[in-house]
Structures are given as C-alpha cells and as structure tokens.
Amino acid sequence: MTAETSSADTYSTENLCLITYTDLTKFDSGLENRCKILYQLAEIDSSVGGKTAVDLPAGKNLIGAFWQPSLVVCDCDVLDTLPEREYRCGCAEVIKYGLLNNAPFFNDLMETPAKEQYEHVISTCVEMKKQVVLSDEFDRGARQKLNLGHTIGHAVEQCSGFTLLHGECVAIGMAVITRAAVKKGFCAKETLDAVE
C-alpha cells in the first residue's frame, strides 16, 4: 500500500536514504537537504507528512524540520512482529484518527480490533493525514488538530521520566482532553466511555 506525498522533488540516486528507523535520521535529512527518504519503518502517523523533530534535555520535539518522503510503503506484516505494548501504542495514534471527525472509522475500531483489519486501518489513517497535510503542510492551522492528546501526552512522558511509551502517553492525553470536552459540552459522554 502506498501514498504519494505533496512534494515532487527530483533527486539523483546518490542522495537516497533507503531505510530510516528514527526521527533523528528524518530530521538530519531535512536539515541537511542531503537525501530523500524512500522507506521508513512507520505505518500510520509519522509515515506521512514529513514533520520530524528530536528531543532536547529541555523537552520533546524542540527542534525539527519538514522533509517529505518521496513514497510511503506500509507493510502490514511488520506489525505482527511488534510486542503487544508497542502495538497498543500504535493503536493510540489510530484511535486519534477515529476521534478526528471520522465516526464510522471510530465505530469500526470499536467493533473489530485493528489487528483484524490492518489494511483498512492503515489506508484510512494515511488518507486522513495526507488530506490534512495537503491543506496545511507546515503545521500552521488544520494540521494542529493531529496533535490531539500530544501536549498532555508529552508532559506525561516527561513526568514519567520516559518510562511510559509515547503512545501510552498520547492515550492518556486523549482521555484527559475527551473528559474536558465532555465537561464543556463539546463531546458526548459515550465517546469518553469508548476512549477510556
């Protein structure tokens, strides 16, 4: 399954990075403008959009860059190799897409585990992110909604001494925000029950 990005840069084969595992590699590529990333080991959120950042002692994601991959290839079989804790972390990012104006997708997730519908889950999330990125590539407006759960999640990560994984913290952040949304009347209590 593939998704093309918004950048259509040309490049020579001497400037290719075939595989990237980390935000550090993606960040360095963007900072130096020295290679185009062709394949990265990510399936949903960080695989699309080209936004990457690295942590500093003062906090998370404090320095970053935008550097679009030429092509995103999602291999569903890789997901079967994940430890359960990492799989659940990825599910937090998936649930985020269901909460962001896609009730049918959220309901699909409630009825059928992501493991039983990988292609549907990945294609839905990648397409949603692609549409947001195409409208706001540099995170100045609509793309900021993709940070749902992340501000509180990053604080939880920091307070835990990074003993909790990113996805676990995003899930906590989404639950906190959903509680606040219910209290303010922006969200139904049933959504909160499903999120928790």
Image (spheres, rainbow, N blue to C red):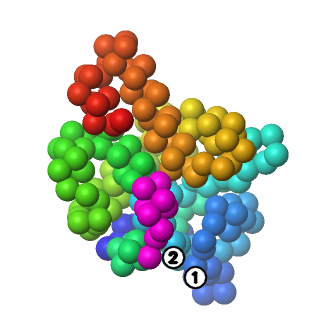
Residue drawn at x 25%, y 22% as measured from the top left: 188
Looking at this view, is 60 or 63 the one in front?
60
Tell me the magenta residue range: 81-90
Residue at the farthest bottom position: 13
> Which residue position is annotated with label 2?
39
Residue 193 shown left or right of residue 69 in the figure: left
Q: Secondary structure at mark 1?
A: loop
| Residue 89, placed above or below residue 145 | below
Q: Residue 72 occupies which quadrant of the picture? A: bottom left
In the rendered image, which quarter contains the N terminus? bottom left
Inspect the image, locate mark 2, and give the three-letter code of the amino acid beneath it: Tyr
Q: Position of residue 32 (x, y in %)?
A: 75, 65
Can you see residue 5? no
Q: Secondary structure at mark 2?
A: loop
C-alpha distance separating marks 2 and 1: 6 Å
Asked if disc 2 and disc 1 are in contact, CB closer than 8 Å, the reply is yes
> Which residue position is annotated with label 1?
18
Inspect the image, locate mark 1, and give the three-letter code of the amino acid beneath it: Leu
